Image (cartoon, rainbow, N blue to C red):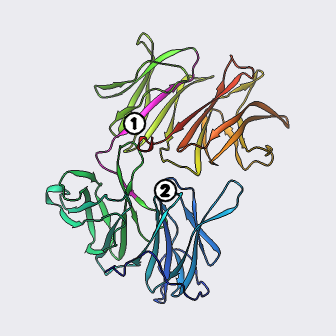
Amino acid sequence: MRSPLFKTALITSLFTTLTACSGGDSSSSKSGYIQLYNGSYNSPFTRLFVEDTERTGADFGGVTTRHNYSSNDYEVNFKYLDANDSYITISEKDVSVRDDMTQLWVMNGDFAEPTFSELSVPTGSDEDVVNLGFFNIVGENISFDVYLANDDGLFETAELIASPQYLNELALQSIDEGYYTLYLTQSGSTDVLFESSSIHLDDDASYVAMIRPSYATEENGITLDLVTASNTVTTLKHQNAKGQARFINTIDDYPKISFNATRGGVSSPTQVITNDSYSNYIELDPNSYSIAMLNEAGNIIVDNFLLTLEREQSNVGIFYNDKEYGPRMMTVKESLTPSSYSHKVTVVNLIDSYAGLDISEVDVVFTLNGETVEDAKNIIDGLDRYDQEDQVVDNEIYTTYVLYEDNGQKIVLMQQGDMDLSQEGNYILIIEHDETSSTGYKMTLERTVTDSVE
């Protein structure tokens, strides 16, 4: 028999007018909440509509604001915007809002055919007590044992509290407020797959821990997203997870180079590569490192540039030449999520001059076929030299322009047609000088995506 705390479908009911606002708890007991958690790994920003009114939305691994409604029945839609700025309906649901409950909808799986699950979660708990439940969206036939440790935080003293299977029924447990460490193993095993940091669970609150793939640096890694009354999740990463870094040299004076990451007396070198090529990844513990670039003979060109890594983080060190200060390194955080319907493009501007004039900034415009620069919606306006900025674009092929404005006149420094931004993942676009090209500039595009989907 299914628990009343988990439902995948509801009977169509009468609709009533919504009340009040979104956000924190209501003082009235005759109301509840609607909320969406986006666990679909390759999804675009997904929007929540209630009674044809757009509320808030969420990217992968994110949650919308909780929206407060009188206890009654409502029509709920989940939608996204396509490349033509048209709302596309993903799914429609009939939702019964209940007193002092949050109807938490979980979208997961491949966005081409996502699965929607409804969890009914109490808005609070008793004094000095926490409601805690686990929902597994990692994959079919994958189940876990969850252990909870307090005080010393050791696995050996942890208590088995749940064994969530894929899209399991949500069984909330009451535990005392306090600091805890969570451990996950495969069901029936005592080999730890995941260890959280020590976290404080507050009383008078309900927590739903979404167990999902991390899609980061760890192969088959796991992440826990804690969903509460907040409009953001608390992401718990595996304490033994590593980070990774790679490098690229854009300075033409050094055609063959290697890189070295050092902490204390331990060094991690890369292979020798040509300039404008990305090195292999170096797997590193989360920490701060001193980075050096060396020539083909192994002699240091520059040294002691700082790079900091967090757990499951992937960074790129981009070496470039600052016209005033010489060689420098810029760090770019790579997004490895396997996005399919939209993509984050991190644009790095290394252009500092045009026709002998200093350039302090440029505009970067992504245009679709038949779309003018003036009509384009994907534009980075005023990107400073030696700086970076993100732009989210749709799953399309673009002609990309780099523009400079000189006394009111727009100059096309370069353009590139047929820039394919439709593969799974995200991108880094470096724009820089190139004496060998007809324009004197060039673009280098690199795709970033987790190995888990390659």
- Relative to 121, is 31 on the left or the right? right
Give me the disc on residue 110. Answer: 2
Return the residue nearer the eye: 403 or 416: 416
Q: Is residue 213 above or below residue 146?
A: above
On whether residue 150 falls in the magenta region, the answer is no
- Give the residue type at disc 2: Asp
Q: Residues within 10 Å of mark 2 (few under 14, many from 20)?
A: some
Q: Residue furthest right?
A: 408
Q: Is residue 109 above or below residue 131?
A: above
| Range of residues picked out in magenta | 235-252
Q: How many marks?
A: 2
Quarter holding the N terminus is bottom left
Q: Earlier in the sequence, mark 2 or mark 1?
A: 2
Which amino acid, by three-letter code, is at mark 1? Gln
Q: Quadrant of the C terminus?
A: top left
State the residue at coordinates (69%, 25%). 441
Relative to the observer, which residue lies in front, 184 or 421? 421
**In which image quadrant can residue 281 be found?**
top left
Numbered disc in front, either 2 or 1: 2
437 left or right, relative to 109: right
Q: Is residue 189 above or below residue 91?
A: above
Q: Which residue is mark 1?
A: 244
Left or right of 76: which side holds 203? left
Percent across and percent down for residue 216 are 41, 45
Element under disc 2: loop
Circle 1: element type = strand
Q: Is residue 98 left or right of residue 442?
A: left
Please provide percent x and percent y for residue 190.
17, 54
> Marks 2 and 1, Cα distance to the nearest angstrom?
26 Å
